[in-house]
Structures are given as C-alpha cells and as structure tokens.
Image (spheres, rainbow, N blue to C red):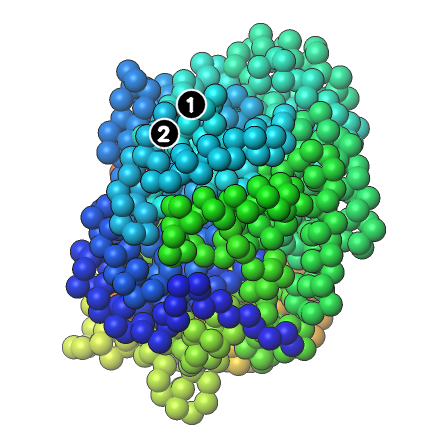
Amino acid sequence: MRRRTRDPGVVGRHREHASELAAALRSAVAGEVDFSVTARALTTMDASNYRRVPAGTVAPRDAADVVAALEVCRAHGTPVVARGGGTSIGGQATGTGVVLDLTRHMGGIVSLDPEERTAVVRPGLVLDRLRAAARPYGLTFGPDPSTHGRCTLGGMIGNNACGAHSVAWGTTADNVRSLDVVTYRGAELTLGRAGRGAPPGLRELVERHLALLRTGYPAGLPRRISGYALDALLPERGVDVVRSFCGSEGTLGVVTEATVRLVPLPAEPVLVVLGYADESAAADAAPGLLEHGPLTVEGMALDLVPDAVGLPRGGAWLFVEVDGEGAARRLVRAADAVDAAVVRDPAGQRALWRIREDAAGTATRALGGGEAWPGWEDCAVPPARLGAYLREFRSLLADFGLRGVPYGHFGDGCVHVRIDFDLWTEEGVRHFRRFSEAVADLVVAHGGSLSGEHGDGRARAELLPRMYGEELVGLFGAVKDVWDPDGGLNPGTLVRPGRLDEGLRFEGLGTADAGAPAAGPGLALAGLPVTAVGRAAARCVGVAKCRVEGPGSGPGVMCPSYRATGEERHSTRGRARLLHEMALGEVVTGGWRSEEVREALDLCLSCKGCRSDCPVGVDVAAYKAEFLDRHYAGPLGLLRRPRSHWTMGRLPRWLDLFGRGLNAATRLPFAARLAGVTPERTMPEVAAASFTSWFAERASDRPPALTLWPDTFTDHLSPEVGRAAVRVLEDAGLGVRLPEGRVCCGLTYVSTGQLGAARRVMRRTLDALDPSGGGLPVVVLEPSCAATLRTDLPELLPDDPRAARLAASVRTFAEALEELAPDWDPPRVDRPVTGQTHCHQHAVLGDAADRRLRARAGLTGGLAGGCCGLAGNFGFEPGHYEVSVACAEDQLLPALRDAPPDAAVLADGFSCRTQIADLTGGRGQHVAELLAEAVDRAAR
C-alpha cells in the first residue's frame, strides 16, 4: 500500500492548534464554526481525484465575517480555501486549513438591474437561482456549466467556468464587471478595469515583464483557462484586474460580491442535432458551423450514448442551438451531416440536453461496468485542430491500454473525458502519471491549454511549465506573492503545486484491503471489510447532482432529505463521503460504530432515488442497510437498536402473529412510545379480513396466467387494493393464483438493516414459492415490494439461482396488463388525476407502462415526482416527522393542492396513501382501484 501523503500547508502546522483556532474563530465571526468530525469529513474532497483533510469549516454570514475569519487564520498561521458547491474537478476546493463554506449564508442576489443588464450577487449563489431571477426579464447569465443546478458564482469565478453557450457568450471572465475581494491580509479591494483594485506592486511587476506577457500565451484559444490570465493586465488590454483575477482558483483573494453581466435569452431557441459518421467527422465539422452564429456547438460520440434513443442516425452528434426556425434550416443545409433532427419542443430539448449534462457522471460508469475517473478532464485546443487532436488522443489512449469517452464543447475545442485509470494501486498511479505527462505534451503540440474549463488545481498545475515555460510559470509565483505574500490562500493549488500523483483520495482503499471489486455497490457487500463499502462509496465523483435546492426544485427523487434540510451530510454525496472517510479511518475513526455516519444516514429515507438519479449510481439505501446491519451487530448491538426496528422493521411477523389484535394494542396508553413511534402519527388500522383470506374463499375456474404477490401491506392493511386488482386482471381475461405458502419480500428488514433476518425471510419465501411457481409472472402491487424483489433479493442472495429467477419474473400491475393482455381495452375513466409516482417505481421499476395504461383509460394529467416522505418506517420514527412533512411539501402536497376538484388521487404505494391521509385527510387510491370501479360501472 502507498504511504498516504499528508499536506500540512505552507504557513504552519495548524492541526496542533485546532481547538485554539476554533475558539478564536467562534469569538470573531457571527457565522457557524464547525470543527467536528462530520464537518471535516464532508469537505475532504470535491469532484476530483484528490483529498485533503481540513482543520474545520466556517460559514461566514457576510463580508465582515470573511475579513474576521481571515484575520484569525492569519494570526494562527492557518491556510484558507473558499468553497462553493464543491464540484471542482482539479482538487482546488479542498484544503488543509479552514474551509470557508460560502453557500450557507452568502448565496443571495443583492440586486438585479434589467435596464443595465447586470446583477450584483454573493459568491455562494447557485447559478440556477440567478438564471431564474433573470428569466422574467428575458435575460440570463451566459456561462452555464452542466452543474448549473448546484455550482456557485464564486466557484465559477474562481475556475473561470464556461459551459455549453460559451461560443456565444464567452467564459465567466467575459461576463464579470467588478469584484469585491478580501486578501489573506484583510485588504478589501474592488477590482475592475484600468488597474482598479490592483494590490500594491502588481502593476509594477507587470510592467517589468511586458514582453513575456505579450509572447508567452498561445493564440487562438477561446478556452485558455490554465494559469493566471496575466495578459489581461497589459496596457493594450485595459489593465483589466477583474479579468486577470477570474480563474485564480481562490489563490489570490476571497470573493465577497460580484457584479455580473446578463445577456438576452434567445427569442426562439431551436436545437439542431447533427449526426456524423464518427467523432472525428463531427469534430472536423464543428469549426465550420461557427460562422452561422450558433449559441452552442456540443459534441459526443456513440460510446457515451450507446442506445442513441431520440438521436438522428450517426456515430457521433453535434448539439447546435440556434435562435429561430430560419437559422435552424440554414444550419441544416450548410452542415455536411449524415442526418439531422430539428427539435423545437422545449420538453424534447430538455430531454436531449439532459444526456449531455449527465455525461460527467455517466462517463464514469460507461465502460462496461468498470470505473473511469477525472484526471485529464477538460483540455482545449484551437477548434480547427480538434479533429486532429482527438484522433491522436484516441491513439494515445490505446497505446497506454486505457479507455475514455471524449465529449464536450467542440465549437470551442474543449474536450471532457473520464478515463479508466487504475488509481487503487501503486503501478496504476505510476501509469496515470506517465499518461498525464504524455497527453500534456500532445495538447501543447496542438497549441492547446491543459485546462479549458475547470482550472488546473492539483491535477494539472505541475504540468504548466510544459505549456507556458519556466519563466512565465515563475511569474505566476511572483504574482501570487504580491497578492498573498503569506501563502495562506489555497496553498498547493495552481502555484507551487505538489505532484499530480500525490494526495489521491483512493489511497488506503486498494484491492488487497477491500476484498471486493471496485464496482458493484449493492447489498452483496455484506460481510466484507469496511474498505469494500469505502470502495463502493468512492464511486461518488462529487458532481453533486444530489444537491438540488428545494423544495419544489425540479423533477426526480434524489435527494429528499437534502431538499428538506439543505445540509451536505443529508445529500447522497455527503453520505458517500462519510462512508469513504469511515473506511479510511483517519477522520471518521469509529468504523462500523461511527455515530457520525449513523446520524447522517438517520435521515436517509431509503427512497432509492440515488440509484437512478445519481449519474454514477451511488446507492445510499444499500449502504445504509449495510451500515445499520454492522452498526448493531452482536448482542449489545441488538439491545442498542431503536425500538422501531423491532416493531416496524418486523411488522410482517407481528401482523402474521396477531392480525387485528394489533389494533387494540395501538390504542393503549403510551403505545406509540413503547413501539418507538412518533406521537404525531396515527397507526394504520389492520383490516377485518385479510386479502389472502378473501381470496381463499372465492372460486375461480380460470387457468392461472399469473401469480399475484400478497405483500404484507396489501394483505393486512389495504386488502381492497388486492381485491380491485383481481377484479381488473380477471376482466382482462387473466386467471389469478396466489402463492400456496406465506411469502414476504423482506423489505422492512432490509430498510432497518436487519440483513440476516432479511435473508432468512427471503429463503423461506423462495422455499414456499418455488415448488408451485410454474414459471408464471409474479405481479406485485406494492412498488416498494416489487423493487425489493427485483434488486435487493438477488443482491442479498447472489448464490441462490431462485432469487434471480424470481427477480426476473416480477411485473408491476401495469406491466402485467400490457404484457399478458395486450388486446384488452381498459375501461374509460375519463378523469383527471393527481398524486405521486412512488419513489421506488421511479428509481427501480420505471413507470412507462403505467403512463400508457393511464392514457388508455382516459386518466389525464401527470403525477408528481419526489418522495412522499413517509417511506415505510421512516416517517413513523421519532425525530423524523418534520423532515417527513417537508419531503411531502417538496412535490406531493403542492400537486394535490393544485389539482382540479374532480381529480382522482393516485398513489400506488401504501406509504404514499398513508402520508396523504395523515397530512390532508384525503384518500389516495391504487390505479387498480380506479380501474375496478370503472369495470363495475360498465358491468352495471
């Protein structure tokens, strides 16, 4: 195993004085000071391959807090790194001293002037919030990275971010008018043109090196992001201090306020998708499209989207946005493309753009189930050289035995790629270094920039002399010393960097320790060393799609608890980072007994949204089940389990044993407390007669076409759903049978981390089902049970072939009708619907068949996304009620309030129906109930 590299910073060994530093900061600032294990663990990494452990975090409330925090840190010899959304690719959002979290309090819009087309913003403002505020005036902020839903303006300024529209609107530096910054020594400067805000000595330093600045930078590069933009300080360029500051990666000063330029939105945006034979043909064609004034020229090849659904013919595509139908027609005529599609519909455009925006994550898992990583993420060459560069780049990958999927901003010559480096072993890291050096030389040979969007950080700064030469890189260091003579701001980044192969976040999780392959995050990890879970959690590359601001902040499910609380530890990324640190054991030292990890996972609803919505498929629900199983292992652990794990977690057992007797028990005084249930909740009533008993008493001479799964919730708590399903299935001509023995999917045991019990329940179920299964499809009415059977069952019993067979046989109600009764016409309901698609249906099962069934039945209107917030035992547990309600307020409750008065409330999940009843007094129905009512009306 490689020795973990520790970076103590360049201004002192601050770790020895952490407690004194924290106390001094708490006395000086109004914002939060957090030196806890959790706060440090959450900020060790960004979206790069690198890791640095901070001393603590500060969330300043305003510029005065920033000044005060810097003064304390300077007095203690502690470095400082400013952090926004933490989506930086080069490692520049990590640090060993104090991390300034600018998102918590400094994320507002100070003013927006539509006449002047400017906005004054704070550095922690998420880009999409600015775009939403400007949209009513027909304006937007031009640069739009794919992380626009969570990246911050401060981070964009620090990295000089660009995005898809840079061919029209340029980089962030092109769109910043002035900046208020604070230096490490506390100087408050307002930066602008004509030398405004330059620290003492900067202009004199520039004047001594005019010739070097005029000749040292490559020409013809719209995406030259590497190094400091010192040529902006030339007299002929207006001594533009603010432009020279953009892209400095937090090494010169901390931004506290920015005045930015807004640009008009296109009046009629049209997306033209051009298909080409291959990537080289698309890259060669891209520069020729620029004369038509496109807003975007984005490229990607077939290996990023192998199914190519919705795309025109070809092996590679250019996504070209133009303003107006006429411009689109002219572009299609001028483009020498194999095929073309003109997309006018905004929904269709969003669907296609989502493919491109998710590429930073999907490229990480697109290589046959293996892993690919950043490390050579975003170089740029002159657009005219892009085709030649890509051909040589692909050849270089092959020479090194590596695979990657290039994509990106072809109109600007900027290429993104994730590569399947082996960063777990010493030899793999040496190979990574050799490749990085070789590809740097290739980029420079084509007149390119090592970074074309995300900055140099720790990933490329060491290689800057290959691009600029030693003299100009030395001048970068001199400029850093003028701005920050103490070296306290983000040391080791961009200037005087460490080696690019040091401080990697994979150290300590090598194959020898993990005992499992790097991929495969599922429940089959149980019983393996803690490093196996760490390797699974390391799949999180930090692009932070889970940090969507809520409530009501967009479609999808991930991550309901983060939407409710806004805290990083409640995001998918935050939980993955804590598990990663738990496996390393340096910051989070408790292993499976870690209270920090338990607390972060406590508000995970096990909605499985991250399984589908996370671009790299991080599955926190599975990790939570693994963790709880190990956290409470052993006799003492069993005693420490929450009571709800024994009551709600083993609910199927208690219902089978006591049935309706539980109704009397729940009415006893203190019943909720004894059961470990929050008093705000009303316990569901057990039905007078179970679904299985009703089914056993009826006769049917139809030969069975399917097995209907009598899940615990349908059987004991909502048998009317089962009866309705039988009515509809038989109306469709399908004979129905039930399993001969008692079956249970094990859901409640899995969600409470009782995996040994879950396996026993699942094996008993397979024993009961297998002899009489007959190969029939198994129709499951409860989405959460269907999802458990499809995913958790084969993951928990990977060596039992019956588990895989059962998982493959599972059908939802709508899937069964579509597959087994394709000629059946559902009865017309002709009624609007509202409600919510179950989170497990969204994440695991899919709802395409359900949407088609509703359309055929005349059920109009869409269902909300998100999670209802009850989530089985979650919403019943003490301490969860407020978050549970907040999750419902994200999408479900607004959808119910906004629905037409005659709308039917659809909720296929028992938890969803329970939440609706608890919070609104209304009643949700399974789609089977609506259809059964219509069948009965037609029969009458």
Q: Position of residue 837 (x, y in %)?
A: 44, 46
Tell me the quarter of the picture where residue 81 sits. bottom left
For this rendering, which residue is in front, 95 or 428? 95
Q: Amino acid at mark 2?
A: Gly
Residue 383 appears left or right of 539: right
Q: Residue furthest bottom?
A: 635
Residue 295 rendering spot, x and y as whole percentages: 54, 21
CB within 8 Å, label 1 to label 2: no
Question: Residue most toward the front?
Answer: 208
> How many marks overall?
2
Q: Earlier in the sequence, mark 1 or mark 2?
A: 2
Relative to residue 271, is residue 460 depicted above or below?
Answer: below
Q: Which residue is mark 1?
A: 238
In what element is the residue under mark 1? loop
Q: CA distance from mark 1 to mark 2?
A: 8 Å
Q: Position of residue 89 (x, y in %)?
A: 54, 49
Residue at (70, 55) in percent of width and height = 420
Task: Classify 419 as above or below 693.
Answer: above
The quarter of the image holding the C terminus is top left
The residue indicated by pointer 2 is: 195
Residue at 79% x, 46% y: name it: 396
Q: Secondary structure at mark 2?
A: loop
Q: Tell me, yes or no, if residue 460 can be seen here.
A: yes
Q: Residue at x 66, y 67 (%)?
A: 424
**Residue 44 placement: quadrant:** bottom left
Q: Position of residue 852 (x, y in %)?
A: 55, 36
Query: Which numbered marker is on residue 255?
Result: none
User: Relative to the observer, which residue lies in front, 754 or 197?
Assistant: 197
